[in-house]
Amino acid sequence: MNTLIKSSEILKRNENYIPGGVVSLNRKSDPNICFTKGNGSRVWDVDGNEYIDYQAGFAASFLGHNDPDINQAVRETLERDAVLMGAGPTDLEGIFAEMFIRSVPTAESLQITTTGSEATYHAIRIARAATKKQHVIVMQGGYNGWHNDVACNVISSLADVGPRVSPGEYPFDSLSAGIPDVHKSLVHIINYNDLASVEYVVKRYDIACIILEPLLQNIGIVKPQPGYLEGLRKLADAHNFLLIFDEVKTGFRHALGGYQSICGVTPDLSTFGKAIANGFPLGVIAGKKKYMDYFVHPEKENRVLIAGTYNAFPLTTMAAIATLKKLASAEHDVYGHVNRLGAMLEEGLNSIFSETDQPYYLARQGSAYCLYLMDHAPADLHDILNNHDFALDKAYRLALIEKGIYNFPLPIKQGSISFAHTEKDIEITLDKTREVVSSLFKGVVVP
Ligand SMILES: Cc1ncc(COP(=O)(O)O)c(C=O)c1O
C-alpha cells in the first residue's frame, strides 16, 4: 500500500478552512484516506491505492459506485435543462411516488426530502401532531439522524450509559452539545429486543412514537428476536402511539418493499434514504394516509410543516426512479446477486475463522454483514459492549485496509456488498482475509 502522503496533505489544508478538515465529522477516520474515485465495487485514493470497497458511502451505493444506468439517467435530466423548478409539482416526483408506493406495500402516500435525517425529523413531528403527545422512545445503539430528538446513544460506552437495566431506560448520551434539556427530557432510550422496557416507559410518559431501525444496522447487524417487532406493533396499538420504522439503511438494501416486507410487521410511518437513490441524496417519509395527511390538515393548528428548496430535486429524483427500475428488473436480479455474494462471503469467513480459537459470530442480512469478535449473535448494544473485542476488531480492519480491502476503520461498522461486486471480488477478499487472520489470530495457515 502506498503511504498516505497526499491524503494527509489534503486533510491538513482542509483544516485551515473546515473545522476538523472534513465536512461530516463521522467520516473522519484513522487512517485518514482521501478517496478520489469510485467505480463499481472499487474505490481509489489520492495516493494511488485501489480498494475493494465494503463501506459503500455508509451503505448508500447499493448498486455500486457510479452505476452507469443511474448516472446516465441523471445526465439526461441535466441535458433536458431540468435542474431546479422550485415552483409547482414536477412530473418526476409523481412518477417516483407511484413507483415507490407500488414497491412498499405499507406506504399509502409519501413526501420526499433530501436526507434521511429530515425524513426521521418529519416522521416524529407527525407522530406528535397526530397523538397530541410529546415523548419519544428510541433505541440504544440505533441511529436515526442528527436532530435534537435522536442524536444520542449510538456506540455509547458502558461508562456513559451504565450497566444493563430491564425494565428501564438509559441516560441520553448526547452526540452533540447544544441539544436543549427539554428535548433530552422528552426522549427515552431503551435497549433493543426488550419489550418490558417499552412497557415500563409507556406507563410513565405520554409516548407519541417509538422510532427504530427494525434491524439495528448502525452497530453492525443486530436482528429482532422472534415476536419483538410484533410486540411493538401491539404495544403501539394498545397505547395509542405510532410505530415508526427507520428504514434509511435497511430499506431498499434488503428488499424492494423494505425490511418491513420481510418481517411482515406494518409500521404507521417509515423513513427511507441511502440505497433508494444509489448515492444521490434523497429521503422519504411514507406510511398510512391518515398520518401523512397531517401535512395538508384542514385545520391550521393541526397542520405539519414540510418545506425545502431542494425537496425532490429533479436530478436526485431521477436517480431514484432509475434505481427503483433497476432494483425491480428481473433481468438484473439485483437481490438474487447480492444475496448469493453475501452467502459466499459468510461461508468463506466462517471457514477461515473456524480454524482459529477466536470466538466470533458472523451476522448477515442479505448484502449487509458484520463480523463480531464474540461467540454469539448480539441481542443489543450492551451485549456487544460486554463481549466484543473492540481493539482486535480495529486491528483487523486496519490490516485489511493495508491489503486493499476497505471496511470503515471503526469497530462494529456494518459491511455492505453492492450489486457491482463479483464472485472474484469475494474470492480476493477471502484470500486477503486469510492472510490477515493468519497474522492476527492463532491457528490459520495461508496455503
Ligand atoms: C438508520 C438511519 N437513519 C437515519 C440516518 C440519517 O440519514 P442522513 O445521513 O441521510 O441524514 C442514517 C444515516 O446513517 C441511518 O443510518
Image (spheres, grey):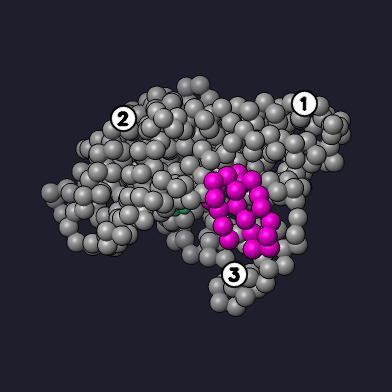
Task: Name the residue rendered at 40%, 36% in the picture.
Answer: 327
The range drawn in magenta is 36-58
The x, y position of residue 123, in whole percent, is 34, 46
Residue at mark 1 to residue at mark 3: CA–CA distance = 41 Å
Which of the two discs, 2 and 1, labels the residue nearer the N terminus?
A: 2
Q: Is residue 104 above or below residue 151?
A: above
* Residue 174 forms part of the magenta stretch: no
Task: Name the residue rendered at 47%, 55% in the picture.
Answer: 146
Q: Which mark is residue 21?
A: 3
Residue occupying the far top of the picture:
226
Task: Name the residue rendered at 33%, 33% in the picture.
Answer: 104
The x, y position of residue 192, in whole percent, is 53, 35
Which of the two discs, 2 and 3, labels the residue nearer the N terminus?
A: 3
Residue occupying the far left of the picture:
298
Q: Is residue 152 visible?
A: yes
Type of amino acid under label 1: Ser
Q: Which residue is mark 2?
A: 105
Secondary structure state at the residue bearing disc 1: loop
Q: Residues within 10 Å of mark 1 (few under 14, many from 20)?
A: some
Which of the two discs, 1 and 3, labels the residue nearer the N terminus?
A: 3
Type of amino acid under label 3: Gly
Which quadrant of the view contains residue 203? top left
- Closer-to-camera residue (244/271): 271
Q: Which residue is mark 1?
A: 354
Contact check, label 1 and label 3, Cβ < 8 Å: no
The x, y position of residue 159, in whole percent, is 67, 49
Q: In which quadrant will I find the C terminus? A: top right
